[in-house]
Amino acid sequence: MNKDNLHILVTGGTGYIGSHVVVELLDQGHTVEIVDNLINSQIEVLDKIEQITNQRPVFHEVDLLDSSALNQVFDHSHFDLVIHFAGLKAVAESIEQPLKYYDNNITGALNLLQSMQSHDVKQLIFSSSATVYGDQGIEQCVETLPTGIKLTNPYGKTKYMIEEILKDLCVADPEFNIIALRYFNPVGNHVSGLLGENPNGIPNNLMPYIMKVAAGELPELHIFGNDYETPDGTCLRDYIHVVDLARGHLAAIRGLKPGFTAYNLGTGRPTSVLEMVTAFEQVSGQPLSHSFAPRRPGDLPKLYADPSKAERDLNWHAELTIEDAIRDILTFINHK
Ligand code: NAD
Ligand code: UFG
């Protein structure tokens, strides 16, 4: 496959990570079509993508659960490859509504794979997560570790189960080339401030919560636990700039090969919650109101990537810092 000007279907392409990947794909000269049901994104994202790239991807408002509508998308165009972001991702909601998560994420993935196979589209990049490593008491995760160990929520289990489905598919149909990218903690946004993460209501994740405090929409950040066995007592994570993450997908396209392969996309550098707060205060020049609260159930004290496999095989590594991410977030907040 000539990898220069591909026709790519992006599911979930109006979402936070998907929209950043679409920008990078268009900038590299690929042709992009998006499938999204807009359950967690807005149609206006297409205008922002167009403002940044001067190109407007074809958009299909289609739910992956609607297999006949999905098949029509594949009947209409021949895709060289699919990047699959579409899914629900709220950990707490997945515990409350497991069937909704299994249906949306697993059935959605199965419908997509069936459409791909029946239309002879056999190159796939899948958005997986560091959550597939579960709780093994290991802080720096490498791809040779087993997956699916002590997973604590249905969301994480869907990522693990989809990876297993993809492995089985590659055994049964050796023409499939599949890469699962295991994201660590994506943060930040496009440097223009036009795209970004803007959840409705009270966010669950650290950076969207900090953003709402900085924007004056929430009074203070609650730091969940300051008695962990870490240097400052708060949890360590691997925060990766979403633009670095997006570029990891470009590298993955070049690295597609027969069978199933998984890569970590992270920086390899752990950052504590308190370090993130301090960095935010330094870059913004403003204090960020925060207080300590009890531990959040299910949180691991330390989780960060060993990204050396992606460096070795894909010639990719993260280049941007958390300070870059915070600077870009401040631009995004000012644009709103
Ligand atoms: P997001 O919610 O911003 O984007 C997901 C998109 O998928 C949304 O636009 C949503 O409308 C769409 N979607 C959901 N279900 C759909 C369906 N049935 N049919 C069609 N469209 C559907 O999320 P994101 O942060 O951009 O995450 C993208 C992917 O990366 C997800 O699969 C997520 O699980 C995975 N991931 C995200 C993170 C993170 O921290 N953001 C970490 C690890 C993995
Ligand atoms: N945190 C706070 N206060 C908040 C929100 C978060 O102190 O208001 C802390 C958490 O306790 C944790 C750290 O900030 O120590 C990061 O929490 P996030 O919720 O931002 O991220 P997680 O590492 O818990 O989970 C994220 C995604 C999951 C994904 C996982 C691994 O939400 O979907 O990374 O990729 F599975």
Image (tube, rainbow, N blue to C red):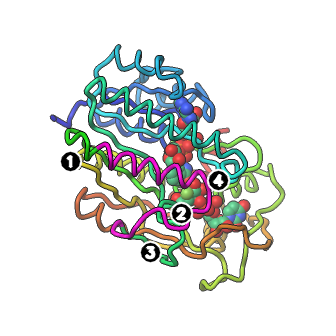
Vertical side of 32 occupied by 321: above or below: below
110 vs 157: above or below: above
Ligand 2 falls in quadrant: bottom right
The answer to whether the beta carbon of the residue marked 4 is less than 8 Å from any atom of ligand 2 is yes
Give the Cα distance between marks 2 and 3: 22 Å
Q: Nearer the viewer, residue 162 or 231?
A: 162
Dot 2 crowding, Cα within 10 Å, few <14, some 14–19, many 20+: some
Q: Who comes first in sequence, dot 2 or dot 4?
A: 4
Marking on residue 323? 2
Disc 3 to disc 4, C-alpha distance: 21 Å
Indicate which label's residue lies in the foreground, 2 or 4.
Answer: 4
SS of the residue under disc 1: loop
Q: From where the camera sits, is residue 330 visible?
A: yes
**Percent of width and height locating residue 232:** 64, 83
Please state the extent of the stretch shown in magenta in the rendering: 143-169
Q: Position of residue 194 (x, y in %)?
A: 55, 37
Residue type at mark 4 is Val
Which residue, given by chain and number where applicable, does mark 1 sit on? Answer: 257
The residue depicted at 64 percent of the width and 53 percent of the height is 91
Type of amino acid at the residue the image marks with label 3: Gln
On the image, which quarter does residue 110 sit in? top left
The three-letter amino acid code for the residue at tag 1 is Lys
> For the C terminus, which image quadrant?
top right
- Mark before the other along the chain sequence, 2 or 3: 3
Does the magenta portion include 168?
yes
Q: Which residue is mark 3?
A: 140
Q: Quadrant of the N terminus?
A: top left
Q: Residue at x 33, y 69 (%)?
A: 144
Q: Residues within 10 Å of mark 3 (few under 14, many from 20)?
A: some
Mark 4: which secondary structure? Answer: helix
